Image (cartoon, rainbow, N blue to C red):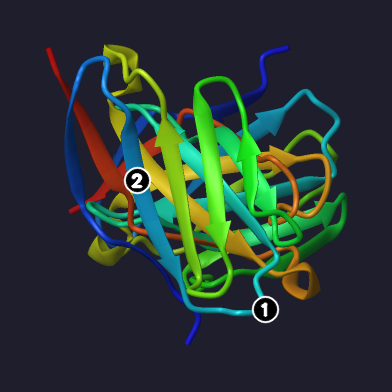
Amino acid sequence: NAGVTQTPKFQVLKTGQSMTLQCAQDMNHEYMSWYRQDPGMGLRLIHYSVGAGITDQGEVPNGYNVSRSTTEDFPLRLLSAAPSQTSVYFCASSYGAGGQYEQYFGPGTRLTVT
Amino acid sequence: GESVGLHLPTLSVQEGDNSIINCAYSNSASDYFIWYKQESGKGPQFIIDIRSNMDKRQGQRVTVLLNKTVKHLSLQIAATQPGDSAVYFCAENTYSSASKIIFGSGTRLSIRP
């Protein structure tokens, strides 16, 4: 199993540009989530999905969109990048609701917005 | 509001000694707690968890202690090794909000040879 994979590993955007961060898992997990991690801080939940076709907002959803068309994939879209979105983004999956089960994290995408 | 915090942002330990990383939480309704380890440049990795109906849980070289009276959580690492160098996060969750987990800001553990 590859586990949770994320692409790209690094990305630099200009303010106002849009992009999609890709996330895929091969463990047949129903629950997937996106977090951002800022320097010296813990992870904050952006969006999550409890299954294909079902998504919901986390703690910091503004400026991000998600969709879940398949069990395997959970892309995160930045609509109009802002410097405040400079961060490291982690995707995670788990067998059940992320807070009550072990989550498996991807390696992260380091995003810089200039 | 809800928060999960750590007493110390950094911890330096002699190789071979035991490490204790502490965490305070404020939501008395939290019923599930997890410790994650994050090595430099990698995503967090699950270490151990504990539910609120337990006070102690042991894994391989790690022990988590939960004191619900003072809302305190600790991670003990026995015989600390260089490979234990990382940032350690505690996290809490409530079954009624099972999809939303709150992470602490992390403690960096460094090992002295």
Asked whether, in this view, residue B16 is left or right of residue A28, the answer is left
Residue A12 lies, in percent from the top left, at 27, 41
Q: What's the amino acid at mark 1? A: Ala
Q: What's the amino acid at mark 2? A: Ile
User: Quick one: which residue is furthest to the left in this view?
Assistant: B113
Q: Which residue is mark 1?
A: B29
Q: Where is the C terminus of chain A found, in terms of image quarters?
A: bottom left
In this view of the protein, can residue A21 be seen by the observer?
no
Residue at left offset 67%, top offset 78%: B29
Q: Where is the N terminus of chain A found, in terms of image quarters?
A: top right
In this view of the protein, can residue A54 be seen by the observer?
yes
Same chain for the residues under marks 2 and 1 in the image: yes
Residue A83 lies, in percent from the top left, at 23, 62
Give SS at disc 1. Answer: loop
Give SS at disc 2. Answer: strand
Asked whether, in this view, residue A33 is left or right of residue A111, the answer is right
Q: Which mark is residue B77?
A: none
Q: Disc 2 to disc 1, how far (Cα)? A: 22 Å
Give the mark nearer the N terminus: 2 vs 1.
2
The reply to whether the C-beta atoms of the residues labelled 2 and 1 are less than 8 Å apart is no
How many neighbours does mark 2 have within 10 angstroms: few (below 14), some (14-19), or many (20 or more)?
many
In the figure, A47 relative to B17: above or below?
A: below
Between B55 and A100, which is closer to the camera in this rendering?
A: B55
Residue at left offset 55%, top offset 33%: B47
Asked whether, in this view, residue A97 is left or right of residue A11, the answer is right
The chain under label 1 reads: B
Asked whether, in this view, residue A13 is left or right of residue B68, the answer is left
Q: Which mark is residue B21?
A: 2
Between B104 and B17, which is closer to the camera in this rendering?
A: B17
In the figure, B51 relative to B76: above or below?
A: below
In the figure, B97 relative to B52: above or below?
A: below
Residue at left offset 50%, top offset 22%: B61
